[in-house]
Image (cartoon, rainbow, N blue to C red):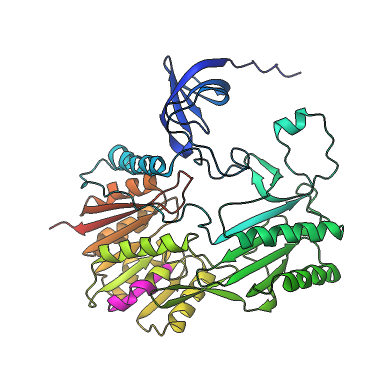
Amino acid sequence: MGRKRKELPLLEGVEITGVAAEGKSIARVNDMVVFIPYGAPGDIADVKLDKKKHSYAEGHIVNLVKPSETRQQPFCQHFGVCGGCKWQHLPYSEQLKYKQQQVKDAMERIAKIPIPEISPILGSANTQFYRNKLEFTFSNKCWLTFEEMRSGIEYPDRNALGFHIPGAFDKVLDIKKCWLQENISNFIRLFIREYTLSKEYTFYDLKAQTGLMRTLMIRTASTGDIMLVVVFGEDDQEKIHNVMTAIAEQFPQITSLQYVVNLKVNDTIGDQDIILFKGKDYIEEEMEGLKFRVGAKSFYQTNSAQAYELYKVARRMANLTGNELVYDLYTGTGTIANFVARQARQVVGIEYVEDAIADAKLNSKVNGIENTLFYAGDMKDVLTEDFVAQHGTPDVMIVDPPRAGMHEDVVNVILSAEPKRIVYVSCNPATQARDLAMLDAKYTVTEIQPVDMFPHTHHVENVVGLSLKE
């Protein structure tokens, strides 16, 4: 028999003093730092420890003795359970303050290089219904809250359509209303849930890997276009036809209705055939008269309105006059590349995903943009000194890497190419700060502009302008 796990203590009357990484709050008890989800600075709470190490611990609030004066009532009934929107209990002005501090801390503690004063963060005009894409999962084993489990009530219907519970891959929280995407998303999801249950179609069993109804993806565009992709876990064409026909009849406003039969173990559809049932196989976003086609597999910033603000910041920092050769690294579907192309002589975009590059080329063609070139491949393999010699030394580089930041080889090629200006767009200020420290060998940071793309979460985008040292 294994040893019985030692019961961890309850800490009474703990004062929460700040906000830490991953959106958790922080408290200090004697010489120990305690990380606590869903706390607000100023809270006095009884905290039950869940994990204890030598210098820190993790716990959760079991009793809010005295709520912070800044704490507010969350607007979503699923707050604290689904794992998303972890800062709904904080006023938006407070959220922005902590995101600003997150950027400042990364620059000072990780980059440790001379920086200018950080500009005030650009908040999102919309703090609800701001996302243009959500993915939902069907499950035959819905998550039960602790209160439901303790109630003694039997729940024979465990079918759910919603979000995965953090730390429980096979459990899904049944979502009644999500405040992240326009309400049409809720209407579509709830209709499909009720229709398929009325037909007694099976919801997916994530452990057994069986069941007809697997996942949904809903995309809504600022143009009014709506895309729905239904993913089925079984190739039952009669049932698939019934589901898709019912959706088409109930929601004629869906402009792109598609489905996938995914029989493999994981939920990703990047390697799957997507079948068009009705409408177009894409939706369109619009920005300054430019049209961007977004397919089922395409990447597009999930906050359309705030993406426009982000791209305007990047373009301004690039300081284009029309004569520059621009390299757009990690170009994705070429949104930034096409957005700045009118102000540049030529834009060269590089991206790892081949499907994204196909979208980038298509978006240039749709908009009549002829001064872009796009290449697919691993950044460190494509962006070499030979590549720069062939295409020309860039005047400006715009880089927008994934959360992990840039590979050291890529940074070295940038340092070797010596563009006059670099615009570094990042979704992770910590890895951005690490890369800035390497770029400091030849570059000076001239401007820092945080941008909030995801209200009620701890995530923050940050745009940094750099110029070549003389």
Q: Nearer the viewer, residue 150 or 210?
A: 150
Q: Residue at x 72, y 30 (%)?
A: 147
Where, by quadrant of the figure, is residue 226 drawn?
A: bottom right
Q: Left or right of 74: which side holds 268?
A: right
Q: Quadrant of the N terminus?
A: top right
Q: Left or right of 470: which side holds 388?
A: right
Where, by quadrant of the figure, is residue 150 drawn?
A: top right
Give the x, y percent position of residue 8.
60, 17
Residue 269 visible in this rendered orientation of the protein:
yes
123 is higher (above) or lower (below) than 347? above
Q: Left or right of 167: which side holds 40?
A: left
Q: Nearer the viewer, residue 162 or 128?
A: 128
Q: Nearer the viewer, residue 362 or 329?
A: 362
Give the x, y percent position of residue 454.
46, 51
Give the x, y percent position of residue 440.
23, 50
Q: Which residues are magenta?
A: 338-350
Magenta run includes residue 348: yes
Q: Residue at x 33, y 69 (%)?
A: 327
Q: Quadrant of the C terminus?
A: bottom left
